[in-house]
Image (tube, rainbow, N blue to C red):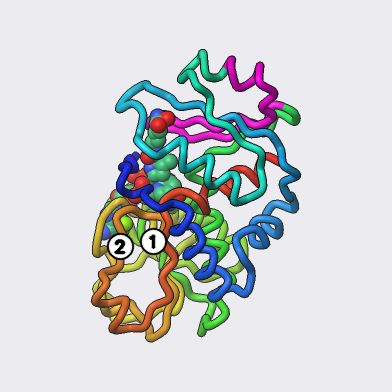
């Protein structure tokens, strides 16, 4: 998995507020309302224990503190444990946490200890960014382009197929393309094809993945991918509504999924 850096998470509250405003503009619902509609749940100040994890590449500066800001924003009652790892887990449970949030280099999870539900950040992120696409109020058709069919992109593409959208997908990884074609029935798309989309969901770890020929004027690009797949130049030239935020929206989706 592409790992966040402390710089990605600078001013997370501002980034989240801006993203929430962008979601409201493109869907007429804010992130809380999208999550409520997706999962049929709402938080009631559940206690969330955020446990720093040192394994692999170790602690990411700003990560746990950003989760504290994000959980506060969505009206959970959260705290970061003083100890990391197993000791931190023990501390969180002993301190009354109902939900545990923790991440190593491969998995970022939310585990609700009161009902046993567990959520994984990658599918939950894919699903909410795709769901926001599916609600785009300026959409000109049911055609959606999905770039990247990995651990975030595939569940997002599946969500769009399940909601009745015509999903066009591309990923240089042949096995992932095959899986998406045979399991989801998506249409394989060559990025050189001169077809314009009013909705694009991008989930790659690469920059500038979105070529000019697929961009319709005033389209929506919804991307959790870091760095951004859309250049600033193309965003301005095509007046694109861009939704991109490094951690908060996917975390909200994951938390609502375990309530
Ligand atoms: P992954 O490695 O499982 O999948 C990425 C896929 O993108 C790969 O299959 C790769 O072949 C494909 N790809 C690369 N270049 C491409 C191109 N030019 N066109 C089409 N496909 C291309 O990674 P994962 O876990 O799905 O994560 C995707 C991105 O989302 C990463 O940048 C990750 O850091 C980010 N992410 C962001 C979150 C958020 O809350 N904003 C949460 C979780 C992940
Ligand atoms: C959760 C994200 C979204 C994008 N990439 C994923 C990532 O960076 N994962 C690693 C998270 C590691 C956290 C570290 C800590 O500070 O506790 N173990
Ligand atoms: Mg990207």
Quick check: marks 1 and 2 in contact, CB under 8 Å?
yes
Q: Is mark 1 within 8 Å of ligand 3?
A: yes
Q: At x 33% / y 53%, what residue is drawn?
A: 226
The image shows a total of numbered marks equal to 2
- Residue neighbourhood size for the residue with mark 2, other residues' Cα within 10 Å, grouped as few (<14), some (14–19), many (≥20): many
Eyeballing the image, is 99 above or below 158? above
Q: Is mark 2 within 8 Å of ligand 3?
A: yes
Eyeballing the image, is 58 above or below 94? below
Badge 1 marks a residue whose secondary structure is strand
Badge 2 marks a residue whose secondary structure is loop
Q: At x 55% / y 32%, what residue is drawn?
A: 101
Left or right: residue 173 versus residue 69 is left
Q: Position of residue 209 (x, y in %)?
A: 27, 63
Q: Which residues are magenta?
A: 90-113
The disc placed on residue 19 is none
> Can the viewer see residue 148 in this picture?
yes
On the rendered image, what quadrant is the N terminus found in?
A: top left
Residue behind mark 1: 202
Q: Position of residue 42 (x, y in %)?
A: 73, 50
Q: Position of residue 85 (x, y in %)?
A: 47, 18
Eyeballing the image, is 85 above or below 149? above
Q: At x 65% / y 31%, what residue is drawn?
A: 99
Q: Position of residue 114 (x, y in %)?
A: 74, 28
Q: At x 34% / y 79%, what residue is drawn?
A: 215
Which quadrant of the view contains residue 188? bottom left
How far apart, in angstroms, are the residues tagged by discs 1 and 2? 7 Å
Residue 94 lies in the magenta-colored region: yes
On the rendered image, what quadrant is the C terminus found in?
A: top right
Residue behind mark 2: 229
Left or right: residue 248 versus residue 194 is right
- Residue neighbourhood size for the residue with mark 1, other residues' Cα within 10 Å, grouped as few (<14), some (14–19), many (≥20): many
């Amino acid at each position: 998995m592409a790992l966040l850096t402390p710089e990605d998470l600078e001013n997370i509250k501002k980034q989240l507020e801006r993203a929430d405003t962008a979601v409201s503009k493109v869907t007429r619902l804010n992130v809380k309302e999208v999550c409520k509609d997706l999962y049929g749940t709402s938080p009631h100040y559940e206690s969330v224990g955020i446990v720093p994890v040192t394994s692999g590449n170790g602690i990411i500066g700003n990560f746990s503190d950003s989760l504290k800001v994000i959980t506060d924003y969505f009206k959970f009652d959260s705290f970061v444990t003083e100890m990391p790892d197993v000791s931190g887990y023990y501390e969180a449970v002993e301190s009354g946490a109902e939900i545990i949030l923790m991440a190593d280099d491969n998995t970022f999870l939310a585990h609700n200890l009161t009902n046993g539900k567990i959520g994984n950040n990658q599918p939950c992120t894919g699903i909410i960014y795709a769901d926001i696409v599916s609600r785009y109020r300026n959409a000109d058709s049911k055609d959606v382009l999905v770039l990247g069919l990995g651990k975030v992109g595939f569940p997002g593409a599946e969500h769009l197929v399940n909601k009745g959208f015509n999903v066009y997908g591309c990923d240089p990884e042949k096995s992932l393309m095959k899986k998406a074609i045979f399991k989801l029935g998506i249409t394989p798309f060559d990025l050189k094809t001169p077809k314009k989309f009013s909705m694009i969901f991008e989930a790659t770890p690469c920059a500038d993945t979105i070529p000019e020929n697929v961009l319709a004027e005033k389209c929506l690009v919804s991307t959790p991918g870091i760095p951004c797949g859309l250049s600033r130049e193309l965003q301005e030239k095509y007046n694109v509504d861009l939704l991109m935020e490094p951690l908060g929206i996917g975390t909200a989706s994951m938390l609502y999924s375990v309530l």
